[in-house]
């Protein structure tokens, strides 16, 4: 049986000093009791909680882990830089190297700016679009997640209407609703921000259609608005040239984070030449935004993604995971949907009102040493070997059995 004694002791202490015992998306308060709140360490495709329970991990730190935890090359690059100093009075030479690497890797990128969180990057994109166009309106897909500050947070505590002024919403993959929003914004349209895949909680994960992605591009080009691709979640997992590259669409600006440095805190904005000057009218900075260690980790991460078949391995692991889960579900007589790019999938059970079955499944999986989330898309890394995926499938079989027995 799985023990959670250490975790429960930590939760007790946390109740006193962390609001709610924990907050934000890493709060396990609303999760079933199989989920540990605190984690001790990770290696490759595995992680361990504070009670020593081992998990084959299909969340990858909610996306940042792309090469596997404690990747030796990334860790060596970070340690080497750390020995020289992380927080200096100016950026290290590594910042130029990283910007050059991003500009060389990403077709639309003529320049790059660095920050820490995805939210920093999406916000800087929106500000750049307004600075460059002198216009106000930003169009957003309803239900899309672009970060955790007032203009975009999904929860509304402390948010005032003015924080959302000049934002308008359209329906993802719905060309008509997009055209209507563009028309309504008129000559005040600064930009459209959109993620490559519709990735909402407990909802079929829906990649953009080619027609829709191209319409975003066409409308921005026609109106002089800025197309912002929020590649924070998908970036560096599907296509290094940007997650809409295969659809023939390059944005004007893109926001990157998560997988950019294999777990080190870094985000980036990349942009076209035409937007370079506008950034000089903005105050884009932060005390920790020039941390050399994260940039060294990013250079090592992106270099490996470019020079090895990491993306191919990740896709293969994702395909194996999908095929295996579908087979297991069918063997238990369960009808499921496993949607989204295979590298970032979500499993849903047919007719699963309030995600009850999904919560049971995820809880039983976690108890058996496979870390999955019930309603948020998961993530696969390049460190997930065929043997890891097979082992995870063996472990998770009983979770399907429990779900089947509960119906
Ligand atoms: N955009 C997207 C598409 C995201 O998935 C996220 C993070 N889940 C963000 C923006 C915000 O990134 P961060 O949490 O690093 O601020």
Image (spheres, rainbow, N blue to C red):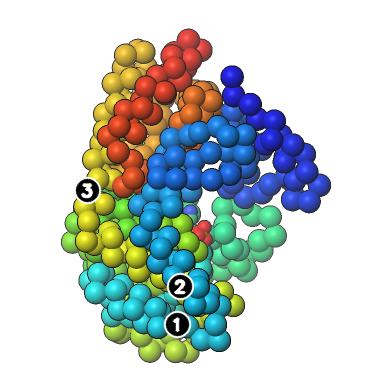
- Indicate the position of residue 116 as horizontal and vertical percent values: 51, 68
- Indicate the position of residue 8 as horizontal and vertical percent values: 71, 34
Q: Furthest residue to the right?
A: 16
Whether residue 67 is visible: yes
Whether residue 135 is visible: no
Q: Earlier in the sequence, mark 1 or mark 2?
A: 2
**Of marks 1 and 2, the one in the foreground:** 2
Residue behind mark 3: 312
Query: Residue at position x 40%, y 45% from top?
Result: 44
**Of marks 2 and 3, the one in the foreground:** 2
Residue behind mark 2: 81
Q: Earlier in the sequence, mark 2 or mark 3?
A: 2
Residue behind mark 1: 92
Regarding mark 2 in the picture, which secondary structure is present there?
helix
Establish if 246 lies above or below 11: below
What is the spatial separation of the Cα atoms under label 3 and label 1, in whole angstroms?
32 Å
Establish if 154 lies above or below 190: above
Establish if 3 lies above or below 265: above
């Amino acid at each position: 049986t799985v023990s959670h004694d250490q975790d429960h002791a930590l939760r007790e202490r946390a109740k006193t000093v962390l609001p709610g015992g924990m907050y934000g998306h890493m709060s396990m308060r609303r999760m079933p009791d199989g989920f540990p709140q605190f984690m001790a360490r990770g290696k490759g495709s595995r992680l361990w909680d504070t009670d020593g329970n081992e998990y084959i991990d299909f969340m990858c730190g909610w996306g940042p882990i792309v090469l596997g935890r404690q990747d030796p090359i990334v860790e060596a690059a970070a340690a080497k830089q750390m020995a020289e100093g992380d927080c200096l009075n100016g950026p290290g030479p590594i910042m130029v190297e990283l910007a050059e690497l991003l500009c060389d890797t990403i077709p639309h990128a003529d320049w790059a700016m660095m920050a820490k969180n995805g939210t920093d990057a999406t916000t800087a994109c929106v500000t750049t679009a307004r600075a460059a166009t002198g216009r106000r309106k930003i169009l957003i897909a309803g239900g899309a997640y672009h970060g955790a500050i007032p203009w975009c947070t999904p929860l509304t505590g402390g948010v005032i209407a003015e924080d959302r002024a000049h934002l308008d919403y359209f329906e993802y993959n719905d060309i008509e609703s997009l055209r209507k929003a563009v028309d309504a914004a008129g000559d005040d349209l600064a930009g459209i921000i959109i993620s490559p895949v519709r990735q909402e909680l407990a909802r079929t994960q829906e990649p953009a259609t080619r027609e829709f992605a191209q319409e975003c591009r066409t409308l921005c080009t026609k109106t002089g608005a800025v197309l912002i691709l929020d590649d924070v979640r998908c970036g560096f997992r599907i296509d290094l040239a940007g997650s809409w590259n295969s659809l023939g669409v390059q944005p004007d600006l893109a926001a990157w984070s998560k997988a950019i440095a294999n777990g080190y805190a870094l985000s980036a904005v990349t942009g076209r030449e035409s937007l370079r000057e506008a950034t000089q009218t903005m105050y884009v900075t932060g005390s920790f935004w020039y941390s050399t260690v994260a940039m060294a980790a990013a250079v090592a991460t992106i270099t490996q993604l470019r020079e090895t078949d990491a993306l191919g391995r990740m896709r293969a692991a994702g395909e194996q995971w999908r095929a295996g889960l579908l087979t297991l579900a069918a063997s238990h007589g369960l009808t499921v949907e496993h949607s989204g790019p295979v590298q970032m999938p979500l499993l849903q059970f047919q007719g699963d009102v309030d995600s009850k079955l999904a919560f049971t499944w995820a809880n039983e999986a976690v108890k058996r040493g496979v870390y999955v989330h019930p309603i948020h898309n998961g993530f696969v890394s390049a460190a997930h070997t065929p043997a890891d995926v097979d082992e995870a499938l063996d472990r998770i079989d009983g979770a399907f059995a429990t779900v089947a027995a509960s119906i």
